[in-house]
Image (cartoon, rainbow, N blue to C red):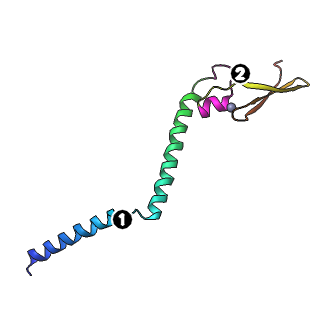
Amino acid sequence: MGRREKSEEYRLEMIRHLKEKYQQAKPSEVLEAEKVIARYRESEARDRGAMARLRLQLPNENLCPECFYMHERESILHTIGSESGVDRFRCRECGYEIETTPRL
Ligand SMILES: [Zn+2]
């Protein structure tokens, strides 16, 4: 076999080898890495949305800031208690709580 035939044999062998390689399921570490990257991209997209909303002040003081900024939903804070001048509020959607004191 001459050099041309040897090269041709090599070429055909590599075609067969690479086709076979990518017809198989991806290695588990590659699948895992792809999942990690997908989760990172999702979290990055959520954070970009939150960053855009965080440029604005809360449109209504009765809204839960956690829901508004981080979950893109409008949920009202409900009074859960009031003692010695301190009012406590909680969001029924996410559980966020705040305490307010009267402005002096
Ligand atoms: Zn909330």
Q: Secondary structure at mark 2?
A: loop
Between tags 2 and 1, which lies in front? Answer: 1
Task: State the image coordinates of residue 31 (x, y, percent, origin top left).
Answer: 46, 59
Real-space Cα separation, disc 2 to disc 1, in angstroms: 55 Å
Disc 1 marks which amino acid?
A: Gln
Where does the magenta region start and end? 58-71
Q: Are marks 2 and 1 in contact (CB under 8 Å)?
A: no
Crowdedness near tag 1: few (<14), some (14–19) or many (≥20) residues, C-alpha within 10 Å: few
Q: Secondary structure at mark 1?
A: loop
Disc 2 marks which amino acid?
A: Asn
- Quadrant of image for the N terminus: bottom left
Task: Name the residue nearer the viewer: 101 or 98.
Answer: 98
What residue is disc 1 on?
Answer: 24
Return the residue found at the far bottom.
Answer: 1
Task: State the image coordinates of residue 32 (x, y, percent, origin top left).
Answer: 49, 59
Task: State the image coordinates of residue 83 (x, y, percent, origin top left).
Answer: 90, 26
Residue at image location 58% in from the left, 24% down from the top = 56
Return the residue found at the far right.
Answer: 84
Disc tally is 2
In the rendered structure, the answer to whether residue 31 lies left or right of residue 83 reads left
